Image (tube, rainbow, N blue to C red):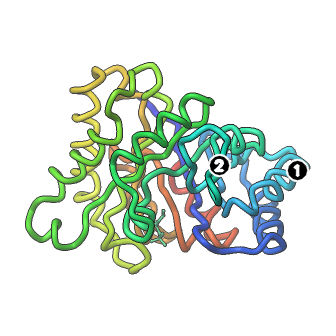
Amino acid sequence: MTRKPLIAGNWKMNKTTVEAASLSQDIAYNYHDSLDDADIVLCPPFIDLKTVNTVLTFDHSKIKLGAQDVYWEKPGPYTGAIAPNMLKEVGCSYCIVGHSERREFFGETDQDINRKIRALLEVGIRPIVCCGENLELREAGEALAFVVSQVKAALADIPAALAKTLALAYEPIWAIGTGRTATPEAAEEVCCALRACLAQRYGADVADQIRILYGGSLKAENAAHFSPQPNIDGGLIGGAALDARNFIDLAKAFV
Ligand code: 13P
């Protein structure tokens, strides 16, 4: 089946509100009609969400808004945290969950990630669920088993009807921000294994609807090597998402 490509820009901890307004305006301005066949998502820091939403709404842009994280509890005494309904109200339709930087620097566990996914699905926000091995696991030949186990844990107790709205993002840690991508074949091998895992869990029909992205040093210059891979349905972009022209050119490689 043909899946609609999904290209999401993860701005990470970059861009003040003024800079976010300028970058989102620039991206919206450079948006290309051919991208109507894809879902393009901007994921700025929490503090920039409202501004970016205002820019996109004002421009009647088809570009969608996503957050980089969420807390699973209902609103209440959780200092510093943001609840799913708050993201919904500010215009988010996507949210990245379980990025390796959150696992590494903020101690997120598979169980936390599962709670976040469930909380997002409850309010109708589509999670982009990240997974990926470090170099040690890759060199030990354990990448596939590790990544599949991360996804199984993330999706525990999530029914098929909800699972089909989420996306997975395979981001090998050693490829993030290093300028060294996985080879397209190696990335495809993992994404194919992830789809097989989804098929085993939810059946082929649901597995076919779930988009699986690759992330890790993707750029406009290398994206065309990944887009033809049958199980890679788009990209999760870090550094290259911070430049409007680069991001749009990269997205065009997937449509
Ligand atoms: P880079 O594109 O900068 O390697 O980052 C990838 C990433 O972590 C996106 O979530």
Q: Answer with left or right where residue 60 lies relative to residue 103.
A: right
The part of the image, by quadrant, that contains residue 89 is top right
- Which circle marks residue 74 in the picture? none
Q: Residue at x 40, y 58 (%)?
A: 108
Indicate if the residue with disc 2 has its beta carbon within 8 Å of ligand 1.
no
Q: In the rendered structure, which amino acid carries the disc numbered 1?
A: Asp
Image x and y of residue 235, in percent: 47, 55
Q: Nearer the viewer, mark 2 or mark 1?
A: 2
How far apart are labels 2 and 1 at the CA level? 36 Å
Outermost residue toward the left in this view: 140
Q: Answer with left or right where residue 62 lies relative to residue 219.
A: right
* Image quadrant in which the N terminus is located: top left
Outermost residue toward the bottom in this view: 178
Q: How many marks?
A: 2
Task: Say few, some or many: other residues with alpha carbon within 10 Å of mark 2 (under 14 / 14 to 19 / 20 or more).
Answer: few
Closer to the chain start, of discs 2 and 1, is 1
Image x and y of residue 25, in percent: 82, 63
Q: In the rendered structure, which amino acid carries the disc numbered 2?
A: Pro
Q: Secondary structure at mark 2?
A: loop
Compared with 201, 195 (above or below) is below
Task: Say few, some or many: other residues with alpha carbon within 10 Å of mark 1 (under 14 / 14 to 19 / 20 or more).
Answer: few
Q: Answer with left or right where residue 131 lies relative to residue 32.
A: left
Q: Residue at x 52, y 51 (%)?
A: 96
Depth check, front residue: 126 or 181 = 126
Image x and y of residue 193, in percent: 21, 43
- Which circle marks residue 59 in the picture? 1
Compared with 182, 66 (above or below) is above
Q: Answer with left or right where residue 200 lies relative to residue 254.
A: left
Residue of label 2: 77
Depth check, front residue: 242 or 147 = 147
Q: Secondary structure at mark 1?
A: loop
Depth check, front residue: 59 or 151 = 151
